Amino acid sequence: MKIVVASDHAGYDLKLKVMEHLKERGIEVEDLGCYSHDSVDYPVYGKKCGEAVMAGQGDLGMVFCGTGIGISMAANKVKGVRCALVHSVETAKMAKQHNNANILAMGGRVTDTELAVQMTDAWLDEKFLGGHHTPRVEMLNEM
Ligand code: RB5
């Protein structure tokens, strides 16, 4: 399992903490930037992560900006990306069960580390339920 991660400056700190957790879980992680607190444009990094996941550079992706909103919007512009912005363990679980999200987004300015780790684990440990959710996910993939 390999996860590609990306952030802007506002999501940088949370990204590093989540990366640490992923590595502790034995997951290979590749950081696509940014690499400091210097101000950068979140669309660049959302797109990078989306394209990397669709190219198979990672099995899944994670993106971080201040709120998680802008970078999730950018990731979702890439065809085939199903990026879910999550704020609770429940939404993180649903992101896998119902939507089979291939990228998870979080906001570094609005999410504490413990919750971020719990949401990450919930998303990774849940299974996609399939069944009637499958054609809906396929509809998303065609958009
Ligand atoms: C950067 O200041 C901030 O706008 C960005 O990180 C993000 O929250 C956008 O959605």
Image (spheres, rainbow, N blue to C red):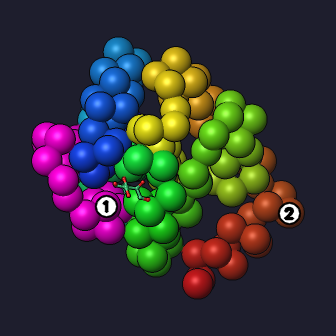
Sequence order check: which comes first, mark 2 or mark 1?
1
The residue shown at (41%, 47%) is 66
Farthest residue toward the bottom?
143
Q: Nearer the viewer, residue 58 or 89?
A: 89
**Can you say whether 122 is above or below 98 in the image?**
above
Picture quadrant where residue 46 is located: bottom left
Quadrant where the C terminus lies? bottom right
The residue shown at (83%, 58%) is 131
Quadrant where the N terminus lies? top left
Q: Would you say residue 40 sits in the magenta stretch?
A: yes
For residue 127, say whether it is visible: no
**Can you say whether 26 is above or below 2 in the image?**
above
Question: What residue is disc 2 on?
Answer: 132
Q: Is mark 1 within 8 Å of ligand 1?
A: yes
Left or right of 95? Residue 143 is left
Left or right of 142? Residue 128 is right
Amino acid type shown at disc 2: His
Label number found at residue 42: 1
The residue shown at (13%, 47%) is 38
Residue 81 is situated, as x and y percent measured from the top left of the image, at 49, 66
Amino acid type shown at disc 1: Tyr
Specify the segment rendered in magenta.
30-49
Residue 24 is situated, as x and y percent measured from the top left of the image, at 35, 15
